[in-house]
């Protein structure tokens, strides 16, 4: 999902994404939806949230982190 789409989603939920990084916006959305704030964390190694809206992006983000080590 593009950054602008994430910002719009946040605004639609009453979250002000002003000066927030993508990761922080997504975690705030997760918290607002009463979900675990796990986007981009090490929890992805054992993630069973198959229906998560952020799963594919999170996997990509975590794969980049691993390849940079």
Image (cartoon, rainbow, N blue to C red):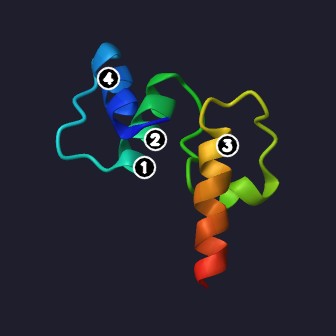
Q: Mark 4, residues whose alpha carbon is within 10 Å: few (<14), some, or many (≥20)?
A: some
Give the residue at the far top of this rendering.
Answer: 12
As helix, strand or loop, the secondary structure at mark 3 comes to helix
Q: For marks 1 and 3, give the CA distance.
A: 14 Å
In the image, residue 8 sits, relative to residue 56, either above or below, namely: above
Q: Mark 3, residues whose alpha carbon is within 10 Å: few (<14), some, or many (≥20)?
A: few
Q: In this image, 31 relative to 3: left or right?
A: right
In the image, residue 66 sits, relative to residue 62, either above or below, namely: below
- Closer mark to the observer between disc 3 and disc 2: 3
Residue at left offset 26%, top offset 46%: 20
The mark nearer the N terminus, 1 or 3, is 1
Q: For marks 1 and 2, give the CA distance.
A: 6 Å
- Closer mark to the observer between disc 4 and disc 1: 4
Q: In this image, 65 relative to 25: left or right?
A: right
Q: Which residue is mark 2?
A: 27
As helix, strand or loop, the secondary structure at mark 1 comes to helix
Q: Which residue is mark 3?
A: 56
Q: Which residue is mark 1?
A: 23
Image x and y of residue 66, in percent: 66, 74
Image x and y of residue 46, in percent: 80, 54
Q: Which residue is mark 4?
A: 8
Q: Considering the image in quadrants, where does the C terminus appear?
A: bottom right
Q: Do the residues under discs 1 and 3 have CB atoms within 8 angstroms? A: no
In the image, residue 58 sits, relative to residue 51, either above or below, namely: below
The mark nearer the N terminus, 4 or 2, is 4
Q: Do the residues under discs 1 and 2 have CB atoms within 8 angstroms? A: yes
Q: For marks 3 and 2, give the CA distance.
A: 15 Å
The mark nearer the N terminus, 4 or 1, is 4
């Amino acid at each position: 999902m593009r950054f602008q789409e994430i910002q719009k989603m946040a605004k639609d939920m009453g979250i002000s994404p002003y000066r927030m990084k993508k990761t922080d916006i997504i975690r705030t959305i997760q918290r607002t939806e009463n979900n675990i704030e796990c986007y981009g964390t090490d929890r992805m190694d054992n993630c069973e949230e198959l229906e998560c809206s952020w799963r594919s992006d999170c996997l990509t983000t975590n794969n980049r982190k691993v390849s940079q080590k």
